[in-house]
Each structure stands twice: as structure tokens, then as C-alpha cells.
Image: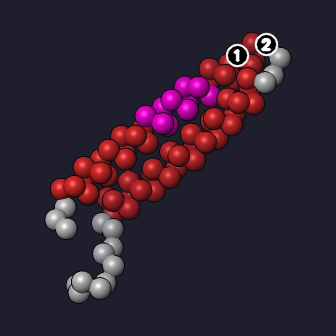
Amino acid sequence: MSSTEPRRAQPNVARARRALWVLISVAVLALGSLASALTRAPSALTGLTVAASGVLLLTATLLAARVIAALEQRRRREPA
């Protein structure tokens, strides 16, 4: 491989990046759902929607942070 050729991402890195974008998309959708639910009139369904959206948002955000940390750790370990 010459120094002018772009390096192709290894399959694990490509899969991690794809998972990161999926998690970011899920977090954005959950945030939209949460914002929408918070503007509704109080009811049991609204409460369930807020709770489910909040849990999904938190989970997707934390998992995305873990993927970012793993990708950064791998980037630092690779030789320049």
C-alpha cells in the first residue's frame, strides 16, 4: 500500500462506525419522541411515552459513548 492510497477501515471498525450512526439516529428519534410527549396533556399514556423515550435516549447515548471510546482507543493504539 503506498502512502497516497487511503487506508480502508477494517471490518470491525466499519461495523463499529455503522453501529455508532445507528445509535445516534435512535437517540435523535428518542429525543424527538420525548420532546413531543412532554408537550402533551398529562395522562398515563404520556407518562409511559416519556419513560420509554427517556430510557431509550439514555441507553442509546451511553452505548454511543462506549463505541466512541472504543474507536478512539483503537485509533490511539494504531501506528501513524
The location of residue 60, given as percent across then percent down, is: 49, 37
Tell me the residue at 62%/28% (across/down): 53
Q: Which residue is mark 2?
A: 43
Foreground residue among 11 and 32? 32
Q: Magenta region's main secondary structure? A: helix
Residue at the right extreme of this rendering: 41
Q: Which residues are magenta?
A: 53-62
**Vertical order, 66 against 20 (above or below):** above
Question: Helix, strand or loop at disc 2?
Answer: loop
Residue 10 sits inside the magenta stretch: no
The location of residue 23, given as percent across then percent down, is: 50, 45
Look at label 2 and name its amino acid: Ser
| Residue density around tag 1, few if under 14, some if 14–19, many if 20 or more, within 10 Å | some
Q: Which residue is mark 1?
A: 47
Question: Helix, strand or loop at disc 1?
Answer: helix
**Vertical order, 15 against 38 (above or below):** below
| Residue density around tag 2, few if under 14, some if 14–19, many if 20 or more, within 10 Å | few
Q: Is residue 44 left or right of residue 41?
A: left
Foreground residue among 55 and 28? 28
**Vertical order, 50 against 13 (above or below):** above
**Vertical order, 43 against 50 (above or below):** above
